[in-house]
Image (cartoon, rainbow, N blue to C red):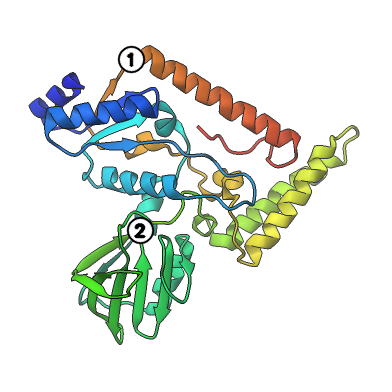
Amino acid sequence: AHIAAAARAVTGCSVLLLCADETDGRRLQSDLAAFTGEEVQLLAGREFVFYDATASRQWEHRRLSLFHAMRHGRAPLVVATAEALLQRTMPPEILDRAALTLRLGDLYNLDDLAQRLTAAGYSRCSQVEGPGQFSLRGGILDIYSPEAEAPVRADFYGDELDSMGIFDPATQRRSTNITEATFLPAAEALPQLAPGGILGLCAAIEKEKLKLERAMKKSGAPQSLQTLWNTMEADSRKLADLQSFPAADRYLDLIYPDFACGADYLPENTFVFWAESGRCMESAKHFLWRVNEDQTTLIDAGALRAKGPSYC
């Protein structure tokens, strides 16, 4: 940590300190902050979701917030686990496109804003209570960005953003007026951001189903192919009906054809230091092994395509 701090002090460049696990990460985060006197962020990994089950997006919210900060030069000091840096995620240019910034006095179409928030994974509700939600009542738009500590209320006079402020979701009372706010996506895997949107993703899934049908016509085709076809058919229907779809990680390669990971968010001229490189390598190898084992199990169960995404 003291060498990383020295590099930061002498050059002013961004620094990434790579470590084996989150325990080491928290210790190095504290040490680096003490040496530099600056805020140090910790990039942790997340669990991929392959089944339609309720899953917390808390880690994804933290990761997207940090990725956005790294992308725009607001996180010059980062400690990351090997797993967190390696695993597949939303490409930087798509994160930029999905992020929504509102500025006081600018003109907006409220219907377009609602569509953009839905595409970014937000849930529309009658009253905002938690991160990843928004509500639209007349000319009042409430948004709770996943990385924010409190939601924002935007009041429109026609198409003009007339006033904006942070409010308490419990009391619905505004506490602080603001002139600008940025709202980040609510998940890393967002089907609406696939090429061609939801319809484009459904078309890509249909192509994969046709490949399966050809494979199933061959003698000796395993039962898992039929199970996979059924899974993809059900997924396609849910997507077409705009239903909630927690298992979007199944189709990461179709949603984001270009592979991206945490390393793609590093600013130019970033120093990358390895804290105990041997342990980092072992951690990375274990992560690769675990991902491969999980994929094999899911493929055998007919829950994942054999030639599907590279997850790291």
Q: Would you call the spot at circle 1 few (<14 residues within 10 Å), some (14-19), or many (20 or more)?
A: few
23 with respect to 2 (left or right): right
Residue 10 visible in the displayed image = yes
- Taking the view exactly as shown, the residue that stands out farthest to the front is 171
Mark 2 or mark 1, which has the lower sequence index?
Answer: 2
Tell me where residue 252 sits by quadrant. top right
Above or below 304: residue 95: below
The residue that appears at 35% across and 15% down in the rendered structure is 277
Q: Which residue is mark 2?
A: 99
In the image, residue 82 lies at what x, y percent?
A: 40, 26
In the image, residue 25 lies at what x, y percent?
A: 32, 28
- Taking the view exactly as shown, the residue that stands out farthest to the right is 219
**For the residues marked 2 and 1, what is the alpha-carbon distance in whole angstroms?**
36 Å
Foreground: disc 2 or disc 1? 1
Q: Which residue is mark 1?
A: 276
Identified by mark 2, the residue type is Ala
Identified by mark 1, the residue type is Glu
Seen from the viewer's position, the closer of residues 191 and 180 is 180
Q: Would you call the spot at circle 2 few (<14 residues within 10 Å), some (14-19), or many (20 or more)?
A: some
Secondary structure type for disc 1: loop
- Taking the view exactly as shown, the residue that stands out farthest to the left is 10
In the image, residue 37 lies at what x, y percent?
A: 12, 34
In the image, residue 257 lies at what x, y percent?
A: 52, 45
Q: Quadrant of the N terminus?
A: top left
Above or below 246: residue 44: above
104 with respect to 59 (left or right): left
